Image (cartoon, rainbow, N blue to C red):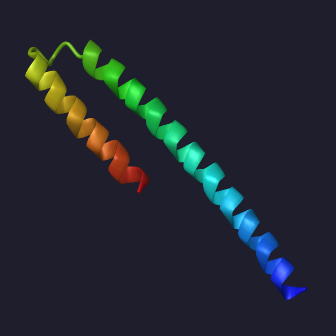
């Protein structure tokens, strides 16, 4: 009896984890796309190196917030 309850709880926990992981990845992807568009349209960044640097910084911050 107790073993089946544990198995059911474990399956629920796994399902919750999978769902949260999918949601987190979807949020990060959306933010990443928005960030890329924002950097591409930023007129204050003149060179490709500046844009790449800024994009790297923003992406790094995006992943740090979610962990």
Quarter occupied by residue 46: top left
The residue located at (74%, 65%) in the rendering is: 11
24 versus 67 height, above or below: above
The residue located at (30%, 45%) in the rendering is: 61
43 versus 25 height, above or below: above
- Residue 18, how many percent across, how many down? 63, 53
- Residue 39, how many percent across, how many down? 26, 21
21 versus 54 height, above or below: below
- For the C terminus, which image quadrant? bottom left
- Residue 35, how many percent across, how many down? 35, 27
> Horizontal placement of 32 versus 16: left or right?
left
> Horizontal placement of 26 versus 18: left or right?
left
The residue located at (24%, 17%) in the rendering is: 42
> Horizontal placement of 26 versus 61: left or right?
right
Number of numbered labels in the structure image: 0
43 versus 17 height, above or below: above
Quarter occupied by residue 40: top left
- Residue 63, how many percent across, how many down? 36, 47
Quick one: 11 or 32, which is closer to the camera? 11
Q: Residue furthest right?
A: 1
- For the N terminus, which image quadrant? bottom right
């Amino acid at each position: 009896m107790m073993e089946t309850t544990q198995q059911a709880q474990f399956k629920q926990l796994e399902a919750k984890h999978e769902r949260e992981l999918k949601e987190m990845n979807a949020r990060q992807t959306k933010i990443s796309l928005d960030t890329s568009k924002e950097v591409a349209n930023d007129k204050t960044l003149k060179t490709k190196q500046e844009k790449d640097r800024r994009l790297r910084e923003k992406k790094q911050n995006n992943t740090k917030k979610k962990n």
